[in-house]
Image (tube, helix red, strand yellow):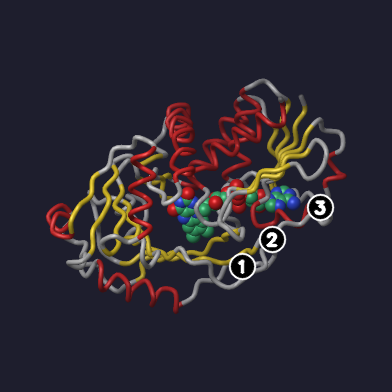
């Protein structure tokens, strides 16, 4: 089959690779260069985890993990840093309770730790006495930008034609293809004027503060939605950010500004949780969330021979390889 893929970010690069490796004729179109910093998939790290308050996401991750392992092997480079994950909140917090249930129902081994046990294992992290944590060893982080580049490289090696710096203005341009997969991230609605989705694009900032956390897990504060990473070995400092959608942002703006107020908020949070980190910002960057009202993903067929897919809402990277796989399957079934 001859398949067009619009958008070569996390989902698109995965779809191109799977289609090309299955022997299909694939042409991918990317409005910028592959690995650019204007969408949602750039940077050093995205959290990967089974631990979710919703059991269906935990279950879906059971399908995504083997795909990540296989990608890493095929790429021959480290794309997944398996450092474990710590998810904390006040005792009996509903999100923590649901996470524990979701892990248990799906048979994923985990441990519940008291604040004192966390302090013993990870002395740089401060939990209050009334807080507790779930430890899960399969969590870690994916090297996001490297994942996109590796998938694109493997897709090309398998015969895909990936065209960069080309904007698809309308799907009518692609009528010669047997199927079109649209994974255009923040630009999704521009290609479906007749069937737009309730998507809100927001600018989100990540901040690296001076200091080092080597041998630490990824972590999520399930009460405040701050989250962070250990030292990633690539960018100096320690990365943290908050998973709360910010104000709407038009993706066609020419830049992705960073705000001092966002860095200040990260510094204030770190002062209470990681007092050993310094106040200096060693790096910061902005990136786009494409939010659905309930934070779920998009996977539908709004036109004949067309699959619309978005691993959106700020938690989709870990699922993007699975979304690419499912999109490739749906295009060629
Ligand atoms: C700050 C931040 C932190 C995050 N943290 C996590 C995390 O810890 N864990 C996690 O799992 N997820 C996380 N996410 C979410 C995750 O990164 C995204 O869900 C994922 O990257 C989305 O991938 P995508 O392929 O849908 O979009 P993108 O990677 O943006 O790809 C869309 C591509 O389509 C191209 N394009 C658009 N329109 C056209 C057109 N008309 N013609 C040609 N090309 C076009 C764009 O240029 C872009 O390259 C985070 C996101 C952000 C912003």
x and y percentages locating residue 79 in the rendered image = 42, 39
Q: Indicate which disc, 2 or 1, sits on the residue closer to the N terminus.
A: 2
Q: Residues within 10 Å of mark 1 (few under 14, many from 20)?
A: few
Of badges 2 and 1, nearer the viewer stands 2
Q: Residues within 10 Å of mark 3 (few under 14, many from 20)?
A: few
| Alpha carbon distance from label 2 to label 1 | 24 Å
Of badges 3 and 2, nearer the viewer stands 2
Q: Quadrant of residue 89?
A: bottom left
| Alpha carbon distance from label 3 to label 1 | 21 Å
Quadrant showing the N terminus? top right
x and y percentages locating residue 211 in the rendered image = 25, 63
Q: What secondary structure is marked by label 2? A: loop
x and y percentages locating residue 185 in the rendered image = 64, 52
Q: Is residue 162 above or below residue 122?
A: above
Image-based side of 121 in relation to 311, left or right: left
Of badges 3 and 1, nearer the viewer stands 3
Q: At 43% across and 42% down in the image, what residue appears?
A: 58
Q: Indicate which disc, 3 or 2, sits on the residue closer to the N terminus.
A: 3
x and y percentages locating residue 61 in the rendered image = 46, 39
Q: What secondary structure is marked by label 1? A: loop
State whether label 3 is within 8 Å of ligand 1: yes
* Residue ID for mark 2: 198
Q: Is residue 95 above or below residue 78?
A: below
Quadrant showing the C terminus? top right
* Residue ID for mark 3: 169
Q: What secondary structure is marked by label 3? A: loop
* Residue ID for mark 1: 255
């Amino acid at each position: 089959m001859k398949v067009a893929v619009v958008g070569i970010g996390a989902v698109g690069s995965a779809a191109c690779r799977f289609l090309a490796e299955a022997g299909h004729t694939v042409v991918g179109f990317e409005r910028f260069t592959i690995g650019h910093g204007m969408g949602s998939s750039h940077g050093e790290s995205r959290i990967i985890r089974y631990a979710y308050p919703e059991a269906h996401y935990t279950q879906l991750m059971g399908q995504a993990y083997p795909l990540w392992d296989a990608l890493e092997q095929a790429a021959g480079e480290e794309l997944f840093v398996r450092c474990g994950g710590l998810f904390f909140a006040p005792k009996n917090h509903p999100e923590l309770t649901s996470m524990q249930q979701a892990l248990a129902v799906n048979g994923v081994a985990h441990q519940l730790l008291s604040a004192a046990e966390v302090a013993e294992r990870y002395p740089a992290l401060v939990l209050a006495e009334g807080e507790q944590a779930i430890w899960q060893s399969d969590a870690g982080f994916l090297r996001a930008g490297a994942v996109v580049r590796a998938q694109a490289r493997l897709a090309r090696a398998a015969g895909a034609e990936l065209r960069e710096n080309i904007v698809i203005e309308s799907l009518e341009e692609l009528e010669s293809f047997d199927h079109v997969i649209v994974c255009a991230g923040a630009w999704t609605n521009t290609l479906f004027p007749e069937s737009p989705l309730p998507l809100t694009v927001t600018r989100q900032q990540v901040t690296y503060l001076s200091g080092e956390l080597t041998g630490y897990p990824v972590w999520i504060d399930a009460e405040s939605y701050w989250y962070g990473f250990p030292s990633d070995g690539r960018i100096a400092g320690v990365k943290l950010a908050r998973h709360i959608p910010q104000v709407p942002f038009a993706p066609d703006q020419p830049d992705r500004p960073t705000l001092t107020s966002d860095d200040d908020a990260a510094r204030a949070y770190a002062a209470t949780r990681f007092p050993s980190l310094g106040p200096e910002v060693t790096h910061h960057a902005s990136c786009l969330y494409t939010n659905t009202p309930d934070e779920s993903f998009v996977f539908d067929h709004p036109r004949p021979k067309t699959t619309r897919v978005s691993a959106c809402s700020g938690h989709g990277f870990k699922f993007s390889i699975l979304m690419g796989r499912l999109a490739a399957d749906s295009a060629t079934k």
